Amino acid sequence: MVFRDGLPTKYLWDRFEHCAAPGPPARSRGRAQRLLRSSPFPALTMTQSDCLFCKLVAGDIPADVVFRSDRVLAFRDISPQAPVHILVIPSEHIGSLDQAGDTHATVLGEVLLTARDLARSEGLAEGGYRTVINTGDDGGQTVHHLHLHLLGGRSMTWPPG
Ligand code: 5GP
Ligand code: ZN
């Protein structure tokens, strides 16, 4: 398969976690990544190699996974802020809620419903719980792969800091 400008798609694959190919020279790689950003093929933009949570999805970094589907991964936060603190993320790389598009409606719905189900299975539903999506610098987002915090097991205060 040949991509735009006749650039073979194998030059684009070094964005993927499990690419076994040696990869193109640095100049070609930069060009490939510029082309990839404007790719008309969504499947080619689903993973970002320098993203911590993409590495978690790929299994390259261990996580205490509590739920996995085709579209969603949920795992316990490494630094829990409540007795239950789970992160629910789309498997596909979406940098933040602000970077989500209308085509992400299904996966965003699945993220929310996964949080609902986990809140029930973790025994939080009756007492209540909090869901949080930090977005951007002012929102306090530190990992730039969209994630929903599910927090519970204690009383929450309001407003948040
Ligand atoms: P944010 O501040 O972006 O809303 O939330 C990022 C969350 O990711 C933080 O609560 C942080 O503790 C968690 N986190 C950061 N690195 C890791 C990691 O390697 N593994 C897990 N399980 N959680 C992480
Ligand atoms: Zn990512």
Image (cartoon, grey):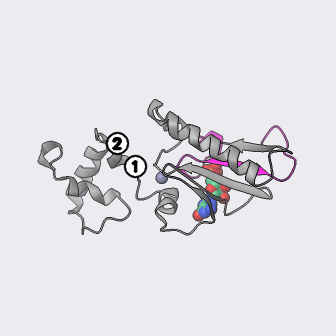
Where residue 83 sits, quadrant-wise, is: bottom right
152 with respect to 9 (left or right): right
- For this orientation, the residue located farthest to the top is 102
Residue 21: x, y in percent? 25, 67
Q: Callout 1: helix, strand or loop? A: loop
Residue bearing mark 1: 46
Give the camera-side residue of 137 and 96: 96
2 shown above or below 21:
above
119 with respect to 91 (left or right): right
Q: Is residue 109 visible?
A: yes
Checking the image for residue 130, the label placed there is none
Residue 3: x, y in percent? 18, 46
**Answer yes or no: do the residues labelled 2 and 1 have beta carbons within 8 Å?**
yes
Q: Residue at x 29, y 69 (%)?
A: 20
Q: Is residue 134 visible?
A: no
Residue bearing mark 2: 42
Question: The magenta stretch spans which residues?
Answer: 133-161
Would you call the spot at circle 2 few (<14 residues within 10 Å), some (14-19), or many (20 or more)? few
Amino acid type, mark 2: Pro
Q: Residue at x 29, y 39 (%)?
A: 38
- For this orientation, the residue located farthest to the left is 6
